[in-house]
Structures are given as structure tokens and as C-alpha cells.
Image (tube, rainbow, N blue to C red):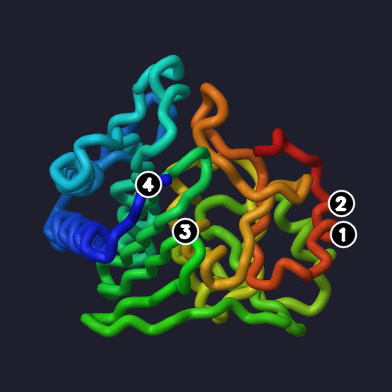
Amino acid sequence: MAEISADLHEAVLVIAREAGQAILKVYEGDFAVEHKADESPLTAADLAAHRVINEGLRRLTPQWPVLSEEAASIPWDVRSRWSTYWLVDPLDGTREFIKRNGEFTVNIALIVRHAPVFGVVHAPVTDETWHARQGRSAYLRTGEVDTVIRSRRPATGPLVVAASRSHRDARTQSVLERMGDIEVIGLGSSLKFCRIAQGTLDVYPRFGPTSEWDTAAAQCVLEAAGGALLAPDGRAFRYNRRETLLNGDFIALGDPTLPWQQWLEAAPRAASR
């Protein structure tokens, strides 16, 4: 198994923060918005953060490949042979970036044998960084201070439920209605997972496509904090198992003992991970 030393851990935190600073340079000025083939938006900030992260990780760990949203055209016959690699979203929440609401993050995960073993989620606007290694505690770094974070267990009502501002559909609404006494909070990007990890949110159901780089880093943080990211069949998310890089439906939980299976009965199931 790949070894994540304390020095490497800290070096990746520095890279994430440098990527965040590159994003803010664009954020604070005027910027153009382009669109990729799938109609998702792209800005100079996405590309600037990608360069910082890609160059930094390749310098630190040249033995491990990097799969980034902005360089995702690596053929499956190459990816399928990887046992260890970096999975990166240089700017998670580009739509939130364009809206200038501050709810976007830098996501960096190390995947070993399909599971995230190290995750870093950095919020450039607030300069907060959530980070964790598999089998250890999860932390929130504010400035230079790390605080151990834990999800809310047991989670008692009213549950605080995250729902995407940019992606809300009828299936999500039907599940929210089955939860009973809840408070719904709109929040962008991987911040939803991180707030669950630190106990200020409880649940995040998601139906419809996301990409593997959207969830991996935050999954590591959430699991280290005591929560879970589950497919509808109850399995934990795993990565780089198929040619597609799209995730199926999922539910993120701070307290995995909640009756989430009953809630999901209201929604048709997509492919499991």
C-alpha cells in the first residue's frame, strides 16, 4: 500500500492552498466562461489550478499518475492498470465560482486499489482545509491550526440535509419528503460532505451524474470523521473500476445508522458503484 508520510501529507496541503490562491486571482477579476463538450463550464481558474496541482504532484510523487478533471482523456486500457494514482478536481463547483458565492473547493485524493486513502478539500474563499488519511482522524485546518472533526452521531431530528443549489430534481425532493422533520440547506461543491464530516450537516442525497473526482477526496474525509458515502445497495464508493468516470446515485451520511434505505425507496436506482 502507498505510504502517506507526514511530510507528503503537508506538501499536498500546501499544493491545495497554492491552487486555491491561483483560483482567487481569477475570481477577483473579470473572467470568461467557456463550455466543454458536455456543456459543463470552464474558466481560466480551472486551468490555473490544474497546472499548479498537476505540476506539484508530479514533482512530489513521479511514480503515481494524476487523473484530473482537466486532463481526463487517459484511455481505459491505461487507467485499468493503475493500482495507485491521484484523483483531482482542480475547481469543484465551477458554477458556484461563476455565481461568485464562494462555495467551491479544490479536491485532491490518493486512490489505492480503488479506495480513497488520503483526501484534501480546500475552500479558497474561507481558507479552510479539510484533510484525512484512511484509518486516522479527520481534521479541519483554519489558518495553521488543525482541529479534529467528527460527524454527528447519533443524528437526531430535525436532521440538517444538504441539497445542491445547482442540481435539484424530483427524485431528490421525494426523498427529502420521506425524511420527515428536516432542515434543508443549499450548499455547493464538496463543502456538503465536509460540513457533514464536521457535524453541522447530517445527510446529502444525490441522484444524477457526478464524476469520480467530485467525491473521492471528500469521501476520505467523511469516512475518517465517522460518516459514510454509500451507493443505493449499501456499498461504499470505489473508483476506477469502469471505463466511465461517472458516479451513480449516492447518499452521504454523518450517521450511517440512519434509516437511509427507507428514504431511498422513493427514488429509482441508478447503477451502483
Find residue 265 and name its label: 2
Q: Callout 3: 10 Å neighbours few (<14), some, many (20+)?
A: many
Q: What amino acid is found at the position of numbered circle 3 in the picture?
A: Ala
Q: CA distance from mark 1 to mark 4?
A: 38 Å
Q: Of discs 4 and 2, which sits in the foreground?
A: 4
Mark 4–mark 2 Cα distance, whole angstroms, equals 38 Å
Q: Is residue 21 visible?
A: yes
Residue at the image point whose x is 75% and y is 84% from the top = 156
Would you identify the image quadrant in which residue 61 lies? top left
* Label 1 crowd bin: few (<14), some (14–19), many (20+), radius 10 Å: few
The residue that appears at 43% across and 33% down in the rendered structure is: 83
Which is in the foreground here, disc 1 or disc 4? 4
State which quarter of the image contains the N terminus: top left
Amino acid at pointer 1: Gln
> Quick one: 200 or 74, which is closer to the camera?
74
Marks 3/2: CA–CA distance: 25 Å
Answer left or right for 17 relative to 121: left
Residue at 75 percent of width and 50 percent of height: 234
> What SS does tag 1 mark?
helix
- Write down the residue under mark 3: 218
Please give the residue where the numbered disc 1 appears in the rendered image: 262
Going by the numbered disc 4, the residue's amino acid type is: Ala
Identify the residue position indicated by label 4 in the image.
2
Q: Going from the N terminus, do you reach mark 3 or mark 2 first? A: 3
